Structures are given as structure tokens and as C-alpha cells.
């Protein structure tokens, strides 16, 4: 057995908690492999695209992870495991917690530049438009909307030569 993978005993416990297979569509992926892949990613912290090939396409693994998150499978699994551990006297509710640690990256790490650096007008206008509009508005953004306020807009149909006259 490889590191980060489920033992037979662990698989027997988790297999009971997974949703039953659908009766339509393609045969589903091996759920044990999907869980092993998800646990590998969570333990290593690697990006989805760096998933080893032995687990299959990363998109399939992501789809299972995302589906189980949406339908509440992860929550039900956690609750069932907590109940089982509590029944066996193996969980201390005073000490049990989920690690919610996060690390704030600097602005420069995200490509935002350093403090006090001049911001691009395109970025500023885009952010303002994004904050004030409906969902998915970034797809509606055009080059015309990103023009700098310092540059005057020309009337449609005019070229540079005509705009000076």
C-alpha cells in the first residue's frame, strides 16, 4: 500500500458512508481511487493538475470532490465518523477542532505590486465595474470600458487625423 492511501479497514468504514451508485449513465469511477487521490492532494498540498497519473485524470477527481462537497457527502461522512468515535470513547469534544489556519500573502505575491505603487487605470476601472455589477460581468467587459479616464474618447467613426480638427 502506498503512503496517503486508505487501508482496507478504513475503506470498509468509508464505503458505507458514500452515496449509492446511480442507475443511469456511464459506470462510475472507482470511489476508493477517488478518495485516495483526494487524500493525496489534501496531504501534499499539491495543485489539482499535479495529481499523479496513477489516480486518473485530475478533472475526474475534482468532479467527485466538488460533487461530494455540493451534496453534503463530506459533512455526512464527518458526522458519522464523529458519532462512531464518540460511541467508542475515542474523541474528546473539548479538544476536537478543525484547523482553520490561513496565511495571508503579500500583495506582490499575487501580482498586485508593492504598497504605494501606481495602479493601472485598467485594473482600477475593471475592479470598480466588477464591484458594482451583476454576477459574471467580467465576460461582458470590453476594451472600450477599460480606457483610461485621462484619455479622451473619440466619437465613433473618427480616426486620429479627424479628431485634431
Image (spheres, rainbow, N blue to C red):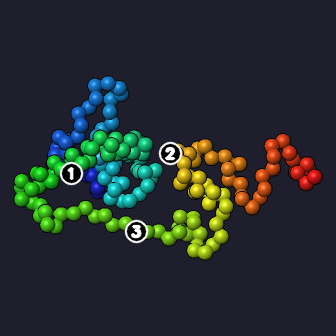
Where does label 2 land, which residue?
135
Question: Pointer 1: residues within 10 angstroms few (<14), some, or many (20+)?
Answer: few
Mark 2 is surrounded, within 10 Å at the Cα level, by few (under 14), some (14 to 19) or many (20 or more) other residues, namely few
Residue sitting farthest toward the left: 88
Asked if residue 99 shows in the view, the reply is: yes
Instruction: Please state if 77 lies on the left or on the right of 161 as rendered.
Output: left
Which residue bears the numbered disc 1? Answer: 78
Q: Cα distance, mark 1 to mark 3?
A: 25 Å
Sequence-wise first label, 2 or 3? 3
Q: Residues within 10 Å of mark 3 (few under 14, many from 20)?
A: few
Where residue 47 appears, x then y in whole percent? 43, 55
Q: Residue at x 32, y 46 (%)?
A: 69
Q: Nearer the viewer, mark 1 or mark 2?
A: 2
Does the residue at mark 1 contact the one at mark 3 (Cβ under 8 Å)? no
Q: Position of residue 120 (x, y in %)?
A: 66, 63
The earlier-in-sequence mark between 1 and 3 is 1
Using the image, tell me which numbered label, if any, was put on residue 103.
3
Viewer-closest of 18 and 79 = 79
Q: Which mark is residue 61?
A: none
Quarter location, residue 103? bottom left
**3D distance between C-alphas at marks 1 and 2:** 32 Å
Q: Quadrant of residue 116?
A: bottom right
- Determine whether, in the image, residue 77 is placed left or right of residue 38: left
Direction from residue 91 to residue 49 in the image, left or right: right
Amino acid at each position: 500500500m502506498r503512503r496517503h492511501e486508505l487501508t482496507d479497514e478504513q475503506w470498509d468504514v468509508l464505503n458505507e458512508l458514500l452515496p449509492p451508485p446511480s442507475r443511469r449513465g456511464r459506470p462510475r469511477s472507482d470511489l476508493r481511487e477517488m478518495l485516495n487521490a483526494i487524500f493525496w492532494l489534501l496531504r501534499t498540498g499539491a495543485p489539482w493538475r499535479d495529481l499523479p497519473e496513477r489516480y486518473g485524470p485530475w478533472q475526474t477527481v475534482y468532479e467527485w470532490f466538488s460533487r461530494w462537497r455540493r451534496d453534503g457527502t463530506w459533512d455526512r461522512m464527518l458526522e458519522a465518523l464523529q458519532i462512531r468515535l464518540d460511541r467508542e470513547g475515542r474523541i474528546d469534544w473539548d479538544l476536537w477542532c478543525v484547523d482553520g489556519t490561513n496565511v495571508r500573502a503579500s500583495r506582490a505575491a499575487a501580482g498586485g505590486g508593492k504598497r504605494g505603487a501606481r495602479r493601472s487605470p485598467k485594473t482600477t476601472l475593471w475592479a470598480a465595474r466588477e464591484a458594482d455589477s451583476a454576477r459574471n460581468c467580467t465576460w461582458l467587459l470590453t476594451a472600450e470600458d477599460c480606457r483610461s479616464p485621462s484619455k479622451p474618447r473619440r466619437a465613433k467613426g473618427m480616426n486620429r487625423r479627424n479628431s485634431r480638427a
